[in-house]
Every structure is written in structure tokens, then in C-alpha cells.
Amino acid sequence: MTDPDLAVCITNTVRLTLGSSLHQHTAPETESGDDGAVVGQQTGNRRFHPAGHPFLVAFVVQLLVLAGQFLASLLLVHAGHHLVWQPLRFALIQGAASATLSFLLRQPIWWWWIHAGFPLAIWLAMRTTLPAWSYLLALLLLLPWYWHTFITRVPYYPSSLPVWQAVDRLLPSGPCRVLELGSGLGGFSLWLTEAHSGCEATGVEWSPMPWLISRVRSWRKGTAACFLRQDYRQMDWQPYDLVFAYLSPAAMPEMWQLARQRMRHGTVLVSYEFGIPGVPADRTIRIAGMREELYAWYI
Ligand SMILES: C[S@@+](CC[C@H](N)C(=O)[O-])C[C@H]1O[C@@H](n2cnc3c(N)ncnc32)[C@H](O)[C@@H]1O
């Protein structure tokens, strides 16, 4: 069996293992009427594909290697070998084998490092004298920030004033409505509402903590910026003249499909830093002093 054959074989095994019990998390499919309004929604029923769920693949990889280690130990004991339990050796084998499997499954390079380091991190944690509840506390502190990040694959990191000013220059000078997909702490929508008179900015954020902070900031400033806590894939984008996104490469293909289905003719989709694979931007805007660019697509 050649290496690519082995990779395909392992991919199929993982897919079968996961595919039988899981359904893909899909965005609703929408249809547009002649006037561009969203006229209906239906839940997609696409087949599960592991490439869209790297965290599940990673989980199965670790489980498979763990099972392999136990099986190998049993066989060795059965063959008369005297095995001494060595946690560090166990963690090193677990990390190396998982990283190799991840490589064969063609997961991105950062997963190899995560696989290699994860068992060692557990080994280190077991050697510390931290009380068990401290791990629960860390989880509870991180959860409101990262929430569905394992599904969306878009963590929080902020854009900055020069980016917001460049987006503002794409807007007409009069009244307008702007939607910010994944509004984080609300910086862009808050700033735009104050800087652009007549502009109504709506930020939508799925993670509870950033959303709560943006709500409090809006309330304290007394601005008209509106912040919704929900998945932007589940909402209507039709009323907005400009949709701004600062997400991640993983989110871009689906976001483009949604933009085509939900945005009105004559509106503009703007993404900071991340382009859409296979869809050249109508405008690429350089921002002074910044390496990353702003991309705009006219719908
Ligand atoms: C890179 S941050 C950008 C924050 C902000 N837009 C800015 O420019 O500073 C992306 C944000 O999108 C949020 N997010 C990711 N997927 C989302 C979804 N499907 N619905 C709502 N928010 C989402 C994340 O929680 C994160 O806070």
C-alpha cells in the first residue's frame, strides 16, 4: 500500500467512524425572491465530511492511538513481556503516533503540533499539585469567550481604527445600514455609529462574553449601535447596505454562499485580511502601515 493509499484508507475509516453517528452542522439554505428578499429557509442535509470538523478528526485520532497503545500493551503482556507503566513514555508514544496519523490524514501542520503536545500537557498537568477544581475554573473562564469556536473555527481577535476608517470610506455619505459579522467587543460598530452620521450599525456575535461586553459598552456610550447574540448564519442580511467581516479562512467559503443568497443587489461585502478562495475581490484596498488588506465584493 502506498502512502496516499494509506492516507485515503485512514481518512475513510475515520469518516465511517464519525459519519454514521453524526450529522453535519449546516447553515440554512435560503432562497431569494425577485426583489432579493429572503423568502424561505430550509435546513441543508449535506453529508458529513471530516474535513469540515477537524476537532472531531483530532479526537478520533487520539482515541485510535490510545486504543492502539492498549492493544499493543496487551499483546506484549500476552507474549510474556514484563511491562512497567511509565506515564512519560506513554505520553511520548501517544503524541508521536497521533502527530504521524494527523500528518497521514493531511490535517494542517498546526494539528501535528497539537497532537504531539497534548499528551505531554496532560502528563505535566498530572505532575503539578494544582487542585482539580482549577481546571474546571479555567474551563468556565474560557467558555464564554470561545463558546462555539470549535465549530466556527473563528476565535476572537480585534481589527483596528485604520481598518474601520477604510470600511467607512466604502459607504455612501448619507444614511446607511451596516451589519458586522462576528462583532467581538463591538469596536467597529460602536465607532461607525459615532463617526458616520445616519449610519445604523448592527453587530452580531455568538460568544456570550464578547457580546455582553459590547452591549455594556454600547449602553455606557449611549450609542444606537445594536448588538445581537446569535449565529450570523441564522439571520437575515437583506436589510444591510454593507456587510463587514473579519473572520478566518475557514469561514470564508460558506460566508460567500450566504452573501450571494442573502444580500441585495447593489450592496457590498467587505472582508478584512481574508479573501474568498476562487472569488477575486472587486476591490482590494491597501491600508497605510498595515500588511493585511481589505477586500470588497459588489453583489
Ligand atoms: C476575528 S474576531 C473579529 C471581531 C470584530 N469584528 C473586529 O473586527 O474586531 C471574529 C469574531 O466572530 C465571532 N464569530 C465567529 N463565528 C460566528 C458566527 N457564526 N456567528 C456570530 N459570531 C461569530 C467570534 O466569536 C469572534 O468574536
Image (cartoon, helix red, strand yellow):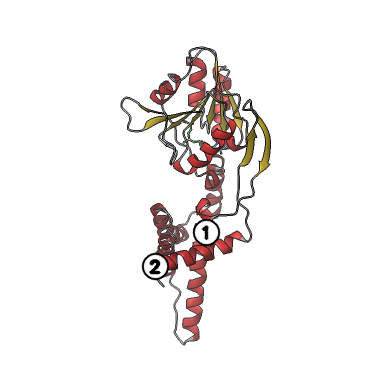
Q: Nearer the viewer, mark 1 or mark 2?
A: 2
Where is the N terminus found, in terms of image quarters?
A: bottom left
Picture quadrant where residue 216 is located: top right
Picture quadrant where residue 47 is located: bottom right
Residue name at image x 60 percent, y 24 percent? 239
Q: Secondary structure under badge 2?
A: helix
The correct choice, above or below, for 106 with respect to 196 in the image is: below
x, y percent for residue 246: 46, 33
x, y percent for residue 91: 43, 65
176 horizontally vs 286: left or right: right
| In the foreground, 177 or 120 | 177
The correct choice, above or below, for 297 with respect to 155 in the image is: above
Q: How many marks?
A: 2
The residue lying furthest to the left in this view is: 289
Q: Which mark is residue 59?
A: 1
Ligand 1 lies under 8 Å from the Cβ of mark 2: no
Residue type, mark 1 in image: Phe
Residue name at image x 47 percent, y 60 percent? 126
Residue 152 seen from this side: yes
122 horizontally vs 147: left or right: left
Q: Secondary structure under badge 1?
A: helix
| Residue assigned mark 2 | 3
